[in-house]
Amino acid sequence: MEMEENRTAFETEGTAMAAESEQKSAEAAEETAGELAEARIMEEETEKEEAEEENAPDYARIVAIANQKGGVGKSTTAINLGAYLAMEGQRVLVVDLDPQSNATSGLGASTISSERQIYDVLVNEVPLEDIIIKTSTEGLDLAPSSLRLAGAEVELVSLYSREGRLKKSLEPVRESYDIILVDCPPSLGLLTVNALAAADEVLIPIQCEYYALEGLVLLLRTIEKIRVYLNPDLRIGGILLTMHDTRTNISKQVMEEVRKQYPNETFITVIPRNVRLSEAPSYGQPISQYDPLSRGALAYQNLAKEVISHG
C-alpha cells in the first residue's frame, strides 16, 4: 500500500515535471520565434535603408577655391582643374564668383554685362540653371560672371539671407553635377562668404612666394568663423602650392614650411610656374586644349586625379 502510494506520488511528480518541461520548451520556442521575427524586421529595415541610399540621387561636391590674396592662381585652378575633372568623366560646373570674370573669359565665354550672369542669380534671384552655359570641354559647364558683380557686394548688404543666396541657388542643380567649383574673388567680402557658406570644402591655392603663410592664417580664421556661424560642415579640401619655381630658394622654403605646418591638408601635386598656363586664358582655352603636354597641363591632370581620390 505504501509502495503504491509512493509510486502514484512519483508518477504525479513526473507528470508535473514533464508538463513544466513542455511549458518551458514552448516558451523557449516562442521566445526564439519572437527573436527571429524581430531580427527579420531589422534585416528588412536595413535592406530598405540600403536600397533608399542606393537609389538616392548623388549630390555634387561643392568646392570653393578661395584665397583673399590676388594672383595666386584661383581662376587658373578653377579653369584647368575643371577641365581635367571633366576629362576624367566627372560632370563639372564652374561658378565664376569673381567680378574680374577671369574664369569666364578663360573658358571662352562672353563677359558682356547685358547677358544674364551670376549677378542676376544672387541679386535678382534668377534660377541658376537659366544662366549656365556649355564650354568647349565636354562635361564642363560654366555659370559666367562680369564686372556687374562688383556691385553685388553693396547690393547684397540690404537683402534677406544675404550670406546664403549662392547656397540656395545651387541646390536645384546639385543632382546634375558631380563637382561644382566656385572661383572666389580676392577678398573676404560677401561674395566669398556666400561661397564658403555654400561649400562642402575649400581648396586654397598658395603662391610659393613671401607672405604666403600670413594670408593663409587669415583665411583659416575666416573659415573657422564660417563654421561657427554659417556652415559647421565646411572642411579644408586641400592646400595647393602654385607658381612653384625650382630655380628660387623662396619657392623651396615656402613649400617646405607649408608641408611642415599642414602635412595632411597639402596636396601632393605642385603647380609649376609655367608660361603656357599664363598664355592659355588669352585664347579662351584650358591648358588641356592649349598645350596638353606642357608641365602645367600635366600638373593639373595629376591634381584632378588627386581631387577625385579625396572625394
Image: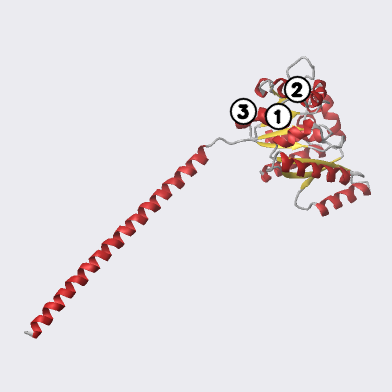
The x and y percentages for residue 233 are 68, 43
Residue 136, above or below 62 = above
Horizontal placement of 91 versus 292: left or right? left
Residue hosting label 3:
172
Q: Kindly identify the residue that appears in the image at 15 percent across and 78 percent down.
A: 10
Callout 1 touching callout 2 (CB < 8 Å): no
Q: Kindly identify the residue that appears in the image at 86 percent across and 32 percent down.
A: 278
Q: Kindly identify the residue that appears in the image at 71 percent across and 23 percent down.
A: 121
Farthest residue, direction bottom = 2
Q: Amino acid at mark 2?
A: Tyr
Residue hosting label 2:
119
Q: Nearer the viewer, residue 159 or 233?
A: 159
Residue hosting label 1:
161
The x and y percentages for residue 213 are 87, 46
Q: Amino acid at mark 1?
A: Ser
**Marked residue nearer the N-terminal end (1 or 3):** 1
Q: Which mark is residue 273?
A: none
Q: Residues within 10 Å of mark 2 (few under 14, many from 20)?
A: many
Image quarter where the C terminus lies is top right
Question: CA gap, disc 1 to disc 3?
Answer: 17 Å
Q: Nearer the viewer, residue 299 or 198?
A: 198
**Marked residue nearer the N-terminal end (2 or 3):** 2
Image quarter where the N terminus lies is bottom left
Where residue 123 sits, quadrant-wise, is top right
Question: CA gap, disc 2 to disc 3?
Answer: 17 Å
Question: CA gap, disc 1 to disc 2?
Answer: 16 Å
Q: Secondary structure at mark 1?
A: loop
